[in-house]
Amino acid sequence: SQKIEQNSEALNIQEGKTATLTCNYTNYSPAYLQWYRQDPGRGPVFLLLIRENEKEKRKERLKVTFDTTLKQSLFHITASQPADSATYLCARNSGGYQKVTFGTGTKLQVIP
Amino acid sequence: NAGVTQTPKFQVLKTGQSMTLQCAQDMNHNSMYWYRQDPGMGLRLIYYSASEGTTDKGEVPNGYNVSRLNKREFSLRLESAAPSQTSVYFCASRRAGQATYNEQFFGPGTRLTVL
């Protein structure tokens, strides 16, 4: 099966520091990985997509890396702010491009 | 644009009752999805519709049926609700085709409790 794991259930970080979240996958390399943000009581919101032939992708304070050797993606938030506090979900494509499989998420809390 | 809308927002059922969760999107997306989200389990795919007129099972389809009524609407039906179906249900849509458009857009969710 195509599993995806987010090892940390929760991560606390001081405001201004860089938050790093980890996503590991098993079996064959996915064609792409996605990262979503989910606030309490709301649906996930798409943040970034990185393809397997891309090493790194950036969007404002966000950076995602994709390491096919380690079978891992790292999600970084630089200069973190309390407003970044949320649950972050990693997802990989499964069964071609039609479906994705989500990880269980990492709850990030940025402490002022 | 409203994006993806879901009704109802909250629902309480008794075991054995039936209900239909409604989902609509106004983005002219081809693909639509139903997920359930449970603590510690993450989002799990129940059913999806790659395009109008087609539906396929996801990871946890038992106890559910779906209807892709038209391009905009995708409904999820619980024929005989069970306490194990207590969950938060999310509908999502995606502009299918090119790999660039693989992001999914989610609705606000329906919180269902089965007593």
Image (cartoon, coloured by chain):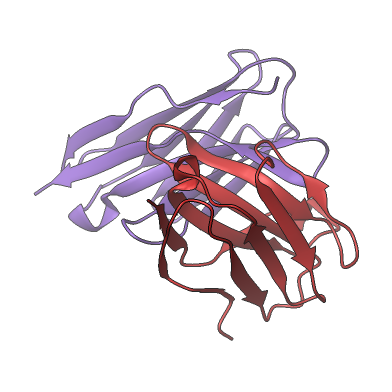
Chain colours: A purple, B red
Residue B109 visible in the snapshot: yes
Q: Position of residue A5 (x, y in %)?
A: 50, 24
Residue situated in front as seen by the camera: A55 or A37: A37
Does B70 sit above or below residue B113? below
Does A75 sit above or below residue A45? above
**Residue extending furthest toward the left:** A112
Q: Is B57 on the left or on the right of A9, as rendered? A: right
Residue situated in front as seen by the camera: B80 or B20: B80
Residue situated in front as seen by the camera: A19 or B67: B67
Q: Residue at 46%, 59% (x, y): give it.
A: A43
Q: Residue at 65%, 38% (x, y): give it.
A: B60
**Residue extending furthest toward the bottom:** B1
Q: Position of residue B81 (x, y in %)?
A: 54, 51
Q: How many marks?
A: 0
Which image quadrant is residue A73 in?
top right
Which image quadrant is residue B45 in?
top right
Q: Position of residue B18 (x, y in %)?
A: 58, 61
Q: Residue at 54%, 32% (x, y): give it.
A: A65
Q: Quadrant of the N terminus of chain A?
A: top right
Q: Is B1 on the left or on the right of B85, as rendered? A: right
Q: Position of residue A105 (x, y in %)?
A: 42, 37
Q: Residue at 81%, 60% (x, y): give it.
A: B96
Residue situated in front as seen by the camera: A42 or B83: B83
